[in-house]
Image (spheres, rainbow, N blue to C red):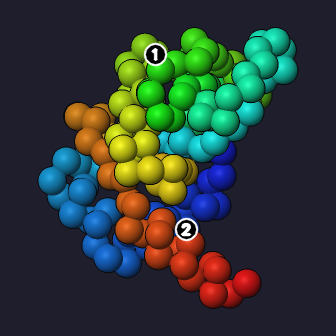
Amino acid sequence: MLENEALFDEVEAELKKHGSIQDFEEKYGKITGRMMITETEIPEELCIKINDTDVHSFKATFDFYNTAIGLALNVKTREAATKFWLTPQDDRNDVPTNSWFEFFAMILMEALDEGMDSIPTFSFVNNSIIPVTLPSAAWACLRRNNRRRS
């Protein structure tokens, strides 16, 4: 399950307003899944303590798996500080396939190329290929609008 489905829905609605979702589906086919990457903490049960301000932990959540994938890495050097870990989100504990670990790492690296402000990320996938929409512009617009409301 997605870490924050309501926020993802808000970003998706913003993209629909601009026709981005429609363009994506015309080119690649109907969207069949979504992945969100957020910052997180290393689970206590892993017994890993890292005291380095450059090391951040991230997790990928999906609307088609109920297990999150986590990873800690140094955001400056891009070196992994941990191996991947899995966090069940309910009793089903369905394990993502290897391709989703690779996809998470690829999208995380692309997002970090844009800077920490690009986290969280919002990705859309379908069954025929795995193109990605990283709606940084939509997310930035929503953050600006939310700051104005505060």
Q: Where is residue 28 in the image (x, y as percent from the top left)?
A: 19, 47
6 left or right of 124 in image: right
Q: Which amino acid does label 2 sit on?
A: Glu
4 left or right of 91 in image: left
Q: Is 106 in front, or is 32?
A: 106
Q: Residue at x 47, y 34 (%)?
A: 76
List the residue tagged with mark 2: 10
Element on which disc 2 rests: helix
Q: How many angstroms separate mark 2 from mark 1 (CA)?
A: 28 Å
Q: Disc number at residue 79? A: none
Q: Which quarter of the rendered picture does the C terminus lie within?
A: bottom right
Q: Which quarter of the rendered picture does the N terminus lie within?
A: top right
Q: Is 21 in front, or is 114?
A: 114
Q: Report crowding for label 1: few under 14, some 14 to 19, many 20 or more residues within 10 A (C-alpha).
A: few
**Dividing the picture into quarters, in which one does residue 50 lie?**
top right
Q: Which amino acid does label 1 sit on?
A: Thr
List the residue tagged with mark 1: 97
Asked if residue 47 shows in the view, the reply is yes
Q: Where is residue 116 in the image (x, y as percent from the top left)?
A: 51, 50
Residue furthest to the left: 27
Q: Residue at x 48, y 66 (%)?
A: 139
